[in-house]
Image (spheres, helix red, strand yellow):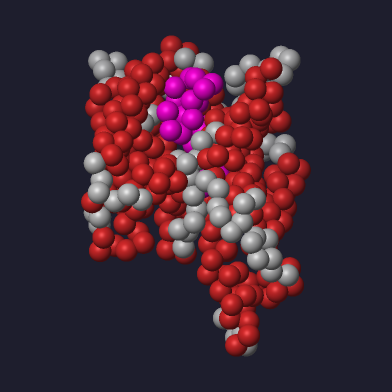
Amino acid sequence: MVNVPEPLRLFAEPDDETSRPLRLTGPVLLLSAALVLSLIAGIALGPSTVALADVLRYLGKAITGGTITGDEVTGYSIVWQVRTPRVLLAAVVGAGLAVVGVAVQALVRNALADPFVLGISSGASVGAAAVVVFGLFAGLGVLALSTAAFLGALGATALVYLAARGKFGLTPLRLVLTGVALTYAFQAVMSVLVYLSPNGQAAQTVLFWLLGSLGSATWASLPLAALGVAVAVVVLLRYGTALDVLSMGDETAMSLGTDAAALRRWLFLLTAVVTGLLVAVSGSIGFVGLVLPHVVRMIAGSGHRRVLALAPLVGAVFLVWVDLLARTLVAPEELPLGVITALIGVPVFLVVMRRRGYTFGGR
């Protein structure tokens, strides 16, 4: 058996199959074009529609440092300061949730797993509730909620890891059971914080955040989340074959020379950090990380490198349109993203599960 102790090699060395080019050029180009068009549509459309020509002109001036006239200030602000960072963040969060969903399902070998099954989202909700109720990190201004949510997610990650770690390391069953149990505990703490709050709007604010929202998106909230998602995509795509091996079980993984315990430990850390970053900027958006990996498997097959090549693009396109619906369906009010993803995700998931011949990880 080959041990792989170094962090950069914990995902096992790729074999000859993973070194061969994937025949996904067509789907990748098609989805990339769809993403570009979706981004432009997301910026142009909304409660107040901006003409496509104006959108392209404002984007060009913002990127090149051009000047605008006085009567263009309002339109420019809507396009560049409000909608562009929000739409880009929707794409980043959608891509990240889809990719992490693929990784978590391989990590715990469970078709019903999603990025929030390990209690990370609930831990972030405790941090967010602490900000709303007690005003923690008030000096950080608009970043207070994101900072507290991320710290809460990291705290939840540490607790889940310590509680789930056993004699044989992190096993899928212990991870799932520990994550579910601590999720209830974190939700109870969050509920107590909201219940005891003297602020009558605390419950509504925390609930809206828990259901997912990109209303507070700014240019400052974009880089860290984008960096985390990019790192996750590169690492997981490079070592997708190790995820195929891990999905077969620890015994099979060990027989093929993969240190399953080390792989699962570092995979847990990677997915936890990325999930924490995403929850911190968008709240809990359900069903994206659960449903989209299955949809992509139906299109691309069960190989993780193939799935990971398409999942971020599918997730990005999907959440950009979900966010557009959230902004326009009941304008000028805004719907939580989690409501729309649930309304779409539930029937899609049922159709996928009833599809003749479909099983987790394959057709």
Bounds of the magenta span?
93-117
* Quadrant the N terminus occupies: top left
In terms of depth relative to the viewer, which is nearer, 309 or 91?
A: 91
- Image-quadrant location for residue 173: top left
Q: Position of residue 243 (x, y in %)?
A: 50, 27
Q: Position of residue 299 (x, y in %)?
A: 71, 30
Measured along the vertical axis of the image, is residue 41 above or below residue 19? Answer: below
Which secondary structure type mostly characterizes the magenta part of the structure?
A: helix
In terms of depth relative to the viewer, which is nearer, 340 or 54?
A: 340
Q: Residue at x 42, y 55 (%)?
A: 224
In terms of depth relative to the viewer, which is nearer, 190 or 145?
A: 190
Q: Residue at x 43, y 11 (%)?
A: 251
Q: Is residue 111 magenta?
A: yes
Taking the view exactly as shown, the residue that stands out farthest to the bottom is: 70
Measured along the vertical axis of the image, is residue 227 above or below residue 125? Answer: below
Residue 320 can be seen, yes or no: no
Q: Is residue 122 magenta?
A: no
Q: Position of residue 232 (x, y in %)?
A: 47, 42
Q: Is residue 170 left or right of residue 83?
A: left
In terms of depth relative to the viewer, which is nearer, 246 or 133?
A: 133
- Image-quadrant location for residue 117: top left
